[in-house]
Image (spheres, rainbow, N blue to C red):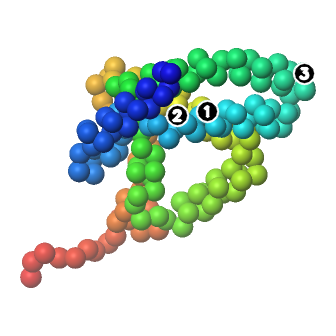
Amino acid sequence: ALYVIGAALRLARFTSDTEPDSASHDTFLGLPSPAAAAFIVATCFYVFDGRHEIGLAPATADAMATGIVRALPYAAAMLGLLMISRVRYVHLAQRYIRHRMRPSTFVKLVLIVWLVAFFHEWLLFVAALIYVVGGLVLGLRAAARGTSPIDDLPAPFDEHADDDGSAPLAGPRDGP
């Protein structure tokens, strides 16, 4: 019930509090509901299909999966609370993909999609876990410092930079 209530309140807050300026779209206030749902789905993929693919002994993998299944209702309740929390989560797509994409960034994205296609059972679980827990740690650390969680992330490339990362030599002139 906490998960469903948290998702409903999160979506209501997102609708009412979203500002039209682009700076307000760099972070989310609380865990985004799609990320919470992705965590639940990725955990199920991992438990039912991927637990034997990580190289553990079958008995160990099954025992670990049993523990995860038993902890899933508590995790769902925590996700519901994180959705309505005041912790800031970084909007990764807005941060890294909204800009004009370099060829190297495109290659990295294609590689990530390829890895997810072939190793989705456990890779999605790890990625969702990193986003939820890592975002919580990053948000709490930024709140303690009084900064934005974006300050601790690598900067996106300059959208006006050349492909080698350097700034353009000359730009448009405003005057004569």
Q: Quadrant of the C terminus?
A: bottom left
Residue type, label 3: Ala
Mark 2, residue position: 36
Mark 1 and mark 2: span between their CA atoms? Answer: 7 Å
31 displayed left or right of 143 = right
What is the secondary structure assignment of the residue under circle 2? Answer: helix
Disc 3 versus disc 2: nearer the observer: 2
Can residue 101 be seen in this snapshot?
A: yes
Please name whichever residue, 96 or 89, is drawn nearer the observer in this view of the structure: 89
Question: Residue reaching furthest bottom?
Answer: 176
Measure the alpha-carbon separation of dots 3 and 2: 29 Å
Q: Which residue is mark 3?
A: 59
Q: Position of residue 108 (x, y in %)?
A: 60, 57
The kind of residue on which mark 2 rests is Ala
Which residue is labeled 1 in the image? 40
Q: Is residue 116 above or below residue 84?
A: below
Estimate the spatial distance between the alpha carbons at disc 3 and disc 1, rounded to whole Å.
23 Å
Q: Foreground: 56 or 2?
A: 2
Using the image, determine if residue 47 lies above or below residue 171: above
Q: Are marks 1 and 2 in contact (CB under 8 Å)?
A: yes
Query: Residue at position x 34%, y 25% from top?
Result: 86
Q: Which residue extends farthest right?
A: 58
| Quadrant in the rendering for residue 121 | top right
Image quadrant in which you'd find residue 42: top right
Q: Is residue 136 visible?
A: no
